Amino acid sequence: AWALGHRPAPAVPSAGQKHRVDYNQLMYAAVLLVHSWLRWAVLILGVLAILRAVAGASGRKPWTPGDDRAGRLFTIALDVQMLLGLLLYFALSPLTRAALSDFAGAMQVSATRFWAVEHVFGMVVGIALAHVGAKRVKSVADPRRKHMVAAIFYGLALVAIAAAIPWPGTPNARPLIR
């Protein structure tokens, strides 16, 4: 019952049947596509926020509205990505639906465990680190220290996120572009 890369059957009518659209499968495919593409925005915005923070700390530059914007865009992209992920996890994904109905069985299969626990855990850790970092940056007065705090927290967030992405070549690989 548990298979790596489990995909729902296409909503194609058999001979003699009327065409019936499976809106759940269409919604699943659409949300999964957006979730897949949004990962690139998250990664790019994360790298941008880190680069600004490292450049600001090493060059002893003042904290600017552009630095605030980079961190805010990174956390907003993460929040939207998380909302899409939660929609997939709890409502649309046939894989997680099956995993949640037999969680003990799902934990015995590494591919299912990755989607049911490991991917979610890594992403939640990354999102938490980014938000804690954004909050800590606001409470620091010294511009160099602001940049250092941003670089550390956004960097750790990006490491956790990158580790939880199903990259090609990993056991739970997904395509880079859907």
Image (cartoon, rainbow, N blue to C red):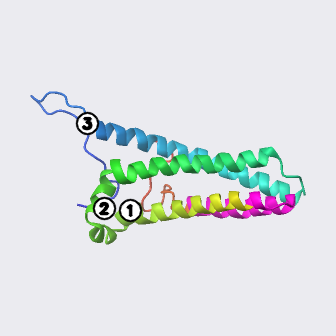
| Residue kind at label 3, given as amino acid type | Asp
| Residue kind at label 2, given as amino acid type | Leu
Query: Residue 131's x, y, as percent?
Result: 63, 58
Kindly indicate the quadrant of the structure image that contains residue 30.
top left
Residue assigned mark 3: 22
What residue is shown at x 72% (from left), y 51% (from top)? 49
Query: Residue 60's x, y, as percent?
Result: 90, 57
Q: Earlier in the sequence, mark 1 or mark 3?
A: 3
Q: Earlier in the sequence, mark 2 or mark 3?
A: 3
What residue is shown at x 88% (from left), y 52% (from top)? 62
Residue assigned mark 1: 116
As for residue 119 lying within the magenta part, the answer is no
Q: Earlier in the sequence, mark 2 or mark 1?
A: 2
Left or right placement of residue 176 versus residue 75 in this view: left
Left or right placement of residue 36 versus residue 102 in this view: right
Query: Residue 12's x, y, as percent?
Result: 22, 34
As for residue 148 lying within the magenta part, the answer is yes
